[in-house]
Amino acid sequence: MTTTAPRLGTALARLLILAAALLGTLLAGAAPASAHAALTGSDPKDGAVVATAPKEVNLTFSEQVAMSADSIRVLDPAGRRADTGEIRDLCSGSVVRYGVELRAGLPDGTYTVAWQTVSADSHPIAGAFTFSIGAPSATSVALPDREPGGGLVGALYGIARYLSYAGFAVLVGGGAFVLVCWPRGAGVRPVQQTVVRAWLVLTGATLAMLLLRNPYTGSGELSDAFDLAGLKSVLETKTGAALTSRLLLLGAAALFVAVLFGSYTRRTDPKEKKDLVFGLGIGGTVVATGIAGTWALAEHASTGIQPGVAMPVDILHLLAVAAWLGGLTVLLVALHRAPSVERAAVERFSKVAFTSVAVLAATGLYQSWRQVGSWSALTGTRYGQLLLVKIGLMGVLVGIAWISRRWTQRLADLPSAEKAKNTENAENAEHAETKTTTEGAEEAKGAREAEDPEDGEGPENGEDGEDGEGSEAEEGSGAAPAVDPERAAQLARQRAAVATARRKRERDADPERSGLRRSVLTEAAVAVVLLVVTTVLTATEPGRTEEEAGRSTSASGPAAVPDRPVDVRLPFDTGGVDGKGVVRLSLDPGRTGANGLHIYVERPDGKPLDVPEVKVALTLEAKDVGPLPVAPDRIQAGHWSASGVQIPMPGEWRIQVTVRTSDIDQTTIDKNVKIG
């Protein structure tokens, strides 16, 4: 059978617009992705005022991090280094803590602690806070406002990450499609080009990530990509080792591709081809598993709970994605550009895709539980929201795949009688077109003779003997007549029109194959959006980690410094209808004396939640002060405010917020904060 071009209908356009709108709503305006480790505590605390200079500054993290000599810097009010630069490993059991010693004889004033490191799953994290010795003072140190892993370098690194995932999927899935589903495709030029280009994309993206790794986790300056000392330090890290291993495995993958599209296509003996298929299958599986392992060993799966189970599951997940989406890409190329694709090949791929979806469902369920851990994290964290989008896109993709499977079942050769009828009709149409073309040529010739009568009459009537003899001499010598460029162009256009008409007849005669192409094209388009969401998901802090870090911060309380507002976020659930949400509370300026209080009550999706009543109470348990009631006024739906809230003395205050969502449904939530 021959192929036909797909026709993009309004259904596909609506689907793509819906997917883009959904993705844009979730990601537009979002801050750069959070890293996967979080600072859960420090000594001294943020905003603390100590009587004497401490000997060291300690930082506690939610998970393991990679420290360098400059990961923790302590700066005095003039911006000079106040630490010795010696990082101490104070980790014990599950507690991840690092410290840096301070110089002796530090004067009073406000000191800035700036830290930057890399979490165990390869993402950079950074932050800063202040503490004071004796009494707060003015400081010339400006806190860094650049997000770790942001800027131009972060954008380029993110693009390289996406391209590496896409290249891996097409390389592995395309090779598997040819080897398992369509062996004849090994000799089809467009299929060869697709797989080879995927190898080039994956190799180039890996090299780019290796070069960008140093500025991505460090200075953020693109020029540092060619710093040899920085590249050497990257190679000594877990991520650098994973990227280097991927490059070595891609060398083996190049050999696999060369044999598949070279020696395999030239073999004619069935036994030799069967042995070669077995060898390519074993070798390709090992190489593909190794490449997938470079992600599992360096990113999400290598940290958190159950890493011994998570890494094999992550490898299976990546291989299933590649088998489905990569095979789908090569099938789409074959349906567009190959002379024909057998029905048996499409049916075999349908079975492979079904198995891949089953593996994706099982491994994805485990990964979701491991990275999210609770329903509140699924709806209340950025990771959980992205995961819901991914699940929705997967559902759409499975639905389109089901439609493709229906077209596959209907795809069959036309009955011989109908095929003969179509052939006869095609021959008649071609004969009519050829006749029209011939008549057009004769008319054009007659027009030229009418324009030049001497050329037409001289030889015919024999009035000019010399010319006649010359014409006979030229004819006898076999000289070719001059070619009219205008006529040649006209004939070329006519041949193109005939070819277009022939392709249209073939398309109309095979609606099943045309329908399959449209559904496969739609499936591939949604898969591109799904891959974008997956790439963003791998660079977002898991919901479980974010909630654990929030609980740790709640236990110790976020510390406020002078002239810095206190901002807290309190999830709540009253248990009734529309009883879940989040309270955002701001206390400004967050110090002793009069403060302004603003409370925002929101639904889990961020929209305002209009509740009947909100009450606030402040308690300083260390001094037996309180609870001090605060009655905020309703400003508008979801916004409550109070002015002149008095904080009589500094210390660690407990802020209690009572939210009532109905006549009988209410709850009280609290958090400790440090008031300077």
Image: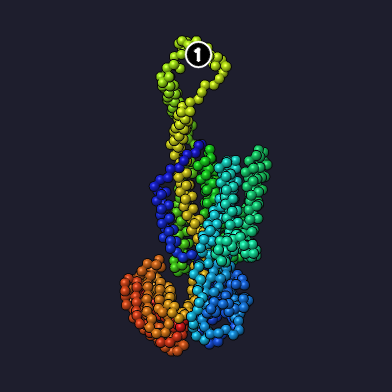
The crowding category of the residue bearing disc 1, from other C-alpha atoms within 10 Å (few below 14, some 14 to 19, many at least 20), is: few
Q: Is residue 322 visible?
A: no
Residue at 43% x, 55% y is 19
Q: Is residue 43 visible?
A: yes
Please say which color scheme the image uses: rainbow
Q: Is residue 326 left or right of residue 287?
A: left
- Callout 1: SS: helix
Please, is residue 525 above or below residue 383 in the view? above
Residue at 57% across, 70% down: 117
Considering only vertical position in the picture, is 274 above or below 556?
A: above
Task: Report the residue at 40% width, 70% height from top.
Answer: 581
The quarter of the displayed image where residue 668 is located = bottom left
Residue 15: image location, x then y, percent:
41, 52
Nearer to the camera, 258 or 522: 258
Whether residue 325 sits left or right of residue 425 in the image: it is right
Q: Which residue is mark 1?
A: 467
Q: Position of residue 338 (x, y in %)?
A: 53, 40
In the orientation shown, which residue stands out farthest toward the bottom? 623
The image shows residue 650 at horizontal and vertical percentages of: 45, 85
Q: Residue at x 45, y 54 (%)?
A: 396
User: Which of the 4 quarters of the picture holds residue 654?
Assistant: bottom left
What count of labels does the image hold? 1
Residue 237 located left or right of residue 138: right
* Amino acid identity at mark 1: Asp
Above or below residue 397? Residue 600 is below
Please provide percent x and percent y for residue 74: 56, 77
